Amino acid sequence: MSRPQPPGTPEIAVRGLRKSFGANEVLRGIDLEIGRGEVVCVIGPSGSGKSTLLRCVNLLEEPTAGRVFVGGTELTDPDVDIDAVRRRIGMVFQQFNLFPHLTVTENLTLPQRRVLGRNKTTAAQVAAENLRRVGLAEKADAYPASLSGGQQQRVAIARALAMGPEVMLFDEPTSALDPELVGDVLAVMRKLADEGMTMMVVTHEMTFAREVADRVVFMDGGVIVEDGAPERVIGDPRHERTRHFLSRLLDPAMAEVEEETSDQVGGGGPVPG
Ligand SMILES: Nc1ncnc2c1ncn2[C@@H]1O[C@H](COP(=O)(O)OP(=O)(O)O)[C@@H](O)[C@H]1O
Ligand SMILES: [Mg+2]
């Protein structure tokens, strides 16, 4: 299954990706490459297609057109063993989706046993290793309800890591958390990045994007508007749409005023001048 790839093969490659839901074209031609060990943060307004893009990268959504490659294997090839490819991709959502009736360890061992067919002992060892990795070894026997949101999200990250993925996709992993719990989750993600994990992260944590990402991609209206180094895209955006989005992020009070008047100005479109 895993053929050796020529050097320089991107870990993730998206070519001419389009996705429609009925008449609504949500992705309008996305081209993106992410190298091995690269961390790319995806930012953009609500509804711009960020989640749909991530979901197309592991084929949770079937693209309408275009091709997606992970580790050189084409996911959009009709003959591909999609379950085998998907095992190489870990995904972390805003909602942690832990089983409430299972302990932390059981939440980590169940998918390893079901999907990878690991035996109980091996699965438990891998679970313990990955709980250590996210700083939660002492919570192995706890139930999710007894953990904070930040701890539950770190368990969800450990659960994904326990499957041994080559690539990790994160969809706003800290958006559901109280502000004081965000830091611990970002610290775990930063450590993963330092260890060389290939990561695609939808987030509005600009400090994380600046300090950890190799590149920042700004999406709007189903297209990539800008793609570049964080200090360039965040610090010196070339497009008015990016500047507009960033200024609203930095000053949410402005955003509220604008949303109230956006019907009149046809909100979301490029600002003239
Ligand atoms: N399963 C779906 N069925 C129909 N429309 C969808 C579905 N998923 C997303 N959409 C639509 O696609 C657009 C982009 O959504 P999404 O990718 O979630 O954006 P973002 O993550 O940037 O907020 C939205 O208009 C949303 O309503
Ligand atoms: Mg989303």
Image: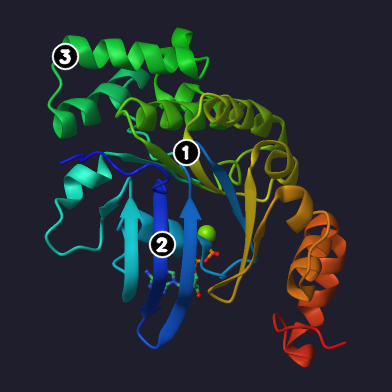
Left or right: 79, with 146 as reference point: left
Left or right: 231, with 140 as reference point: right
Q: Residue type at mark 1? A: Thr
Q: Residue type at mark 2? A: Val
Judged by depth in the image, the label closer to the viewer, 3 or 2, is 2
Kind of element beneath mark 3: helix
Residue 21 location, x and y as percent?
37, 79
The dot on residue 120 is: 3
Quarter of the figure with residue 168: top left
In front here: 136 or 162? 162
In front here: 164 or 110? 164
Q: Is residue 183 above or below residue 77?
A: above
Left or right: 178, with 17 as reference point: right
Label 1 packing within 10 angstroms: few (<14), some (14-19), many (20+): many
Earlier-in-chain disc, 1 versus 3: 3
**What residue do we see at 63% from left, 49% from top?**
215
Kind of element beneath mark 2: strand
Left or right: 3, with 130 as reference point: left
Mark 3 Cβ and ligand 2 under 8 Å apart: no
In front here: 164 or 175? 164
Labelled pair 1, 2 in contact (Cβ < 8 Å): no
Earlier-in-chain disc, 1 versus 2: 2
Separation of marks 3 and 2 at Cα, in angstroms:
37 Å
Residue 97 location, x and y as percent?
39, 40
In this orientation, does residue 173 appear? yes
Read off the residue under disc 2. 14
Q: Is residue 100 above or below residue 104?
A: below
Q: Residue type at mark 3? A: Lys
Read off the residue under disc 1. 198
Residue 73 location, x and y as percent?
26, 51
**What residue do we see at 44% from left, 39% from top?**
96
